[in-house]
Image (cartoon, rainbow, N blue to C red):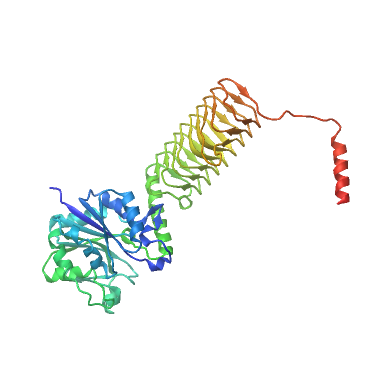
Amino acid sequence: MVRSCLSIVLAAGEGTRMKSSLPKVLHKVAGLPLVCHVIRQIELLNSSQLAVVVGVGAEDVTKIVQSFVKNVMIFEQKERLGTAHAVLSARIALEKEVDDVLIVFGDTPLIEQNTLVKIREQLAKEADVVVTGFYTSNPTGYGRLLNKNGKIIAIVEEQDASDEEKKISFCNGGIMAIKGKYVLSLLDKVNNNNLKGEYYLTDIVSIAACEGLNIQVVEVPFDHVVGINNCFELFEVDVLWQKRKARDFMLSGVRILKPESVYFSYDTEIESDVVIEPNVYFGSGVKVRSGAVIHAFSYLEGVVIGIDTEIGPYARLRTGTELERSVKIGNFCEIKQAKIGECSKINHLSYIGDAEIGKHTNIGAGTITCNYDGFNKHKIVIGDNTFIGSNSALVSPLIIGEGAYIASGSVITENVPADSMALGRARQIIKEDRAEKLRERLSANKKKN
């Protein structure tokens, strides 16, 4: 029998140590807001209900969350009175009958689905309350898990811990799960008799222990539950995320020559037998098919890269670009909102925007599509087996037919029929014996000045 679950994400924290006007949970790791990383893992559980508690920057956080996931309940914690108070902000959701209530912090982007599964498995067995814990050689700043006769009896926060309790190295991982039938009665018994005068969610553990409820702990790696309090910790977590992503890619057959120099986004998709050279940036929405080679210093976002395609070095591929099989995009090229056909080449120093290019077409060095008139973008269509000479300017809207030939240095403003040659440049004029006279005149003018 499938157990119903209400998942609550706490995203109300102010995050003052971030020293930023942006709410903490909207800072990004791998191009995705922290809170969305958490929601992404919860969604993999097929949780029956999802609630997000917002506070500082409530409007901004709500907008991002609702654009990322459907069917989410938003509750606002109007006063910052502690984590238990934040959970109770979702009382309306808690009053509905569910088997499990899962509570996760919105600034822990490294949590994994399997950790959440293990926690819920404990509730499905015999546990009434499940907490997470990790061991660390430096527990400063973390709540400690108090153990008596092999059973967890309390979580004590750092500032309320005795000197003896501070020696404990088994710390609170933050994630908590409670059987739905107990959650409100436990939360309503939490008080604020502590140094901060706040209602701690962690006090549920000691209350549950006093009532004889079954409390279990799931041990987790620290880097699965690490939270973020400042921009340096944000950087450290991003590094951990990137290492994890690079490892997963390499174990699936992707060759990354220098993983620490490559940056992936949360939704990057790369098939096996792809080679990635150093210093490559993957923005959101990139899909790379098998056999492609991404040379150094390339920047990719919102692009589909076909089988056996070669990119870079120093290439920029922008949103809306789709490259078919065996396409070559060389150094110092920028491609935007363009579909490039099989075996076509844009080898160097070109800008191609709002374009559709056929198969086996060559775009010469220095070619640009003039796709913007100051108000609107216009499209260019270039057929199969077409040759565009170097240093050509193609003024959109424009259609260049299949097999056409554009002479180097041309400015093309009118459609070119198939199998035609177009030349749009001034005729070359040669004036013999004029060079020396020109030099003499220029030299004389220079002396006068």
Query: Which residue shows up at 80% across the image and 29% down it?
Result: 430
Residue 130 coordinates in the image, percent (x, y): 19, 61
Query: Which residue shows up at 44% across the image and 34% down it?
Result: 307
Farthest residue toward the left? 212
Q: Is residue 388 above or below residue 64?
A: above
Q: Is residue 393 left or right of residue 158?
A: right
Query: Which residue shows up at 32% across the image and 56% down it?
Result: 62
Query: Which residue shows up at 51% across the image and 45% down it?
Result: 298
Residue 443 coordinates in the image, percent (x, y): 87, 45
Farthest residue toward the bottom? 163
Q: Inspect this view and state whether residue 272 appears.
A: yes
Residue 449 coordinates in the image, percent (x, y): 86, 52
Q: Return the residue nearer the eye: 86 or 230.
A: 86
Q: Is residue 15 above or below residue 419?
A: below
Residue 415 coordinates in the image, percent (x, y): 57, 26
Farthest residue toward the top? 419
Q: Inspect this view and state whether residue 36 appears.
A: no
Q: Is residue 323 left or right of residue 374?
A: left
Q: Is residue 427 left or right of residue 83?
A: right
Q: Is residue 448 left or right of residue 208?
A: right
Q: Return the residue nearer the eye: 77 or 265.
A: 77
